[in-house]
Amino acid sequence: MGPVDVLVFSPHPDDAEMGCGGTIAALIGEGRSVAVCYLTRGEMGTRGDAETRAAETREAMKILGVGAYVYADIPDAHVFNDAHNRETVVRMIRQFQPRLILAPYHLTLHPDHVQTTALVNDAAYLSGLLKIDTGQPRHRPARIMYYPLHPKFDPTLVVDISSTFKQKMDAIRAYRSQFHDPSRPDMPQTLLSAQDFLDRLEAQARHFGSLIGRSYGEGFRTDLPLPVGEARELLQIL
C-alpha cells in the first residue's frame, strides 16, 4: 500500500461512504488511486458490532472500487486530538503520502466527527516535520478538503457524481446493520435507521447537484483558495 493520490479519513465505517462515496468512485474511475482510513471500527454503535461492520466495509469498498483501506484502531467514541492519536494519523499520512486528504467537516453532531477534523488537520501539518520520527519519510499533503456529515453544509465546491451516485448509494446500503430494516422492528432505533434517512441523503445529493446544474453532486469545503495557475484553467472547470 504505497503512495496514493487521495487519502480519505473516516471516523467510523460508513462515514466516508455517506460523505464522499461518489467522489471516491469517480476518482477511481478516472484512474486515480484512493485509500480510506477508518479511525475506529464503530464498535460503540447502537446497532451492529465491529465484526459485522468490518464485513459490511469490505462489501462497500468493493462496490466503490477501493483497493486499499485500513483501520487506525482508535477506540470508538475516543477520537480525541491527543498526542497518541496524532502520531497514529501521522503514520497513516506518511504511509500513503497523499496529495489530497478528504476529512469530515467539523460542523456535525457526533463528537468523534468533530474531533476528526482537528486531529487530521494537526497530523497533516506535523507529518511534514523532520524531527517527528516515525521511521518513515516525512510528508505533508498539498491540501485538505472537508466533506459533510450533517445536513447543514454550505459547499465551496461541488463534484458532479451523477455517474457514480448509484455506486455511492449501493456502498451505503452495504451497511445493512445501520439502516432501516422493516423485518427487524426489535432493533434499537437511531438517526440512521429512520425510514427516510436514505431519502434525505439522496435529497442532499440532488441539492448539491442542482448548484452546478447536474443531477447529483457532493459538496466540499476548503479553507484555502483553490489555485488557478493559468487563466485558461478557468474555462477547464466550467
Image (spheres, rainbow, N blue to C red):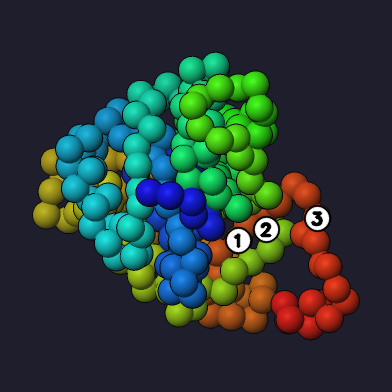
Q: CA distance from mark 2 to mark 1?
A: 5 Å
Q: Position of residue 137 (x, y in %)?
A: 56, 35
Work out whether mark 2 precedes mark 3 in sequence or the reverse, and give the earlier one.
Answer: 2
Quarter of the figure that contains the C terminus: bottom right
Question: Which mark is on residue 155?
Answer: 2
Nearer the camera: disc 2 or disc 3: 3
Please give the name of the residue rendered at 45% of the width and 79% of the height, measured from the top-left corner: 163
Element marked by disc 3: loop
How crowded is the residue under tag 3: few (<14 C-alpha within 10 Å), some, or many (20+)?
Answer: few
Reading the image, the residue beneath label 3 is 225
Amino acid type at circle 2 is Pro
Reading the image, the residue beneath label 1 is 219
Q: For the residues labelled 2 and 1, say whether their Cβ atoms are less than 8 Å apart.
A: yes
Work out whether mark 3 precedes mark 1 in sequence or the reverse, and give the earlier one.
Answer: 1
Q: CA distance from mark 2 to mark 3?
A: 13 Å
Q: CA distance from mark 3 to mark 1?
A: 16 Å
